[in-house]
Image (tube, helix red, strand yellow):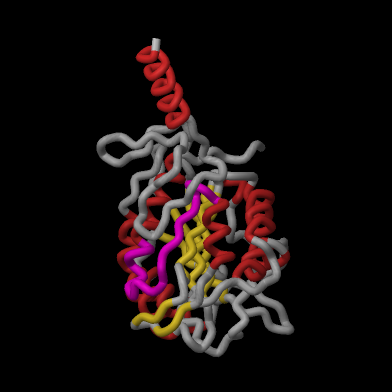
Amino acid sequence: MKVKWIALIAALVAAVMLTGSCDGGDSRGSDGDDDSSGDTDIDADGDADGDGIGCKSMDILFVIDDSDSMAQEQESLVASFPQFIDVLDNYDPPGDDPMVWRVGVITTTITPEGGGVLVAPEECGLGAHRWIDGPGEDVAEKFACVADVGVGGSGAEKPFLTIQMALGENAEVGYPNYGFYRKNEASLLVIVIITDEDDVSGLTATEMKEYLDATTGGDGRYVVVGIAGLQECNSEFGDASLAQDIQDLVDLCGTNGMFGDICEGDLWVSLEQALELMELVCDEFEPPPA
């Protein structure tokens, strides 16, 4: 009888370990591993084998800290971008159409005039819109121009609030960001926050997650990447503070979130991991109800 009880307990433990959910699971950390028990099965080639129809495009919003300690991080981002778009351009999404994408940039600064407006200096040659559409021959040059946001911004970084302003009031008809996020066109929204400080918007990670759910139509339709301080540290980029609120937001996003340590020095390390996540989520994408 004792042997039978041991066998029964072992079976129950195994069943519990096999049970999991995508919602609220552990996020992919700075090592890029997926520690969650999601619904996505990855085959031997690393491809997602799920039931989603796949995203048709990606709308990628870079939220760049423009305070006086961010010059080297901005340089690393610009240097990494050609590799970033090369991976995007070679991604074979679900369906018959090639991947199309767009990139926009906002900063973490709120001024008396506002914030969250896509950066689009005239000299960057973006044309009629305040974002960069890809694929294209000159997208890396345009991004290098737009991502050079400078270091004259506020030291009170508010990425949560500028994201809400970028996707909210500034995205309404007649406002600067109108048309950037293609919610009703099966587009995956990707938010990449790059800062050496934590958010001081006064918004909690839970409030930010709820806002993104409401804006996009729910989990699975957006990705949040935080590249910030995993802890207080000093690197070739200088000092970084613990970005606990940004880490909390990434954690709440579960398998759709990824956090990279800005103190690693080379932003490509985190951006490469972000691209892997973006492709996996795109493979599993389900559009919002009509």
Magenta-span inclusion, residue 263: yes
Tell whether 116 sits left or right of 79.
Answer: right
The residue positioned 57% from the left and 40% from the top of the image is 287
Q: Is residue 230 above or below residue 22?
A: below
| Coordinates of residue 16 in the picture (x, y in percent) | 47, 28
Q: Is residue 224 above or below residue 123?
A: above
Left or right position of 118 against 69 = right
**Residue at screen point 38% across, 34% down:** 41
Q: Quadrant of the N terminus?
A: top left
**Is 189 within the magenta?**
no
The magenta region covers 253-271
Image position, residue 111 (x, y; %): 69, 83
Q: Which residue corresponds to the image point at 56% horizontal and 45% vertical from the top-left?
A: 24
Residue 36 rendering spot, x and y as whole percentages: 45, 43
Q: Residue at x 34, y 37 (%)?
A: 42
Q: Nearer the viewer, residue 112 or 248?
A: 248
Q: Single out the residue that lies furthest toward the left.
A: 44
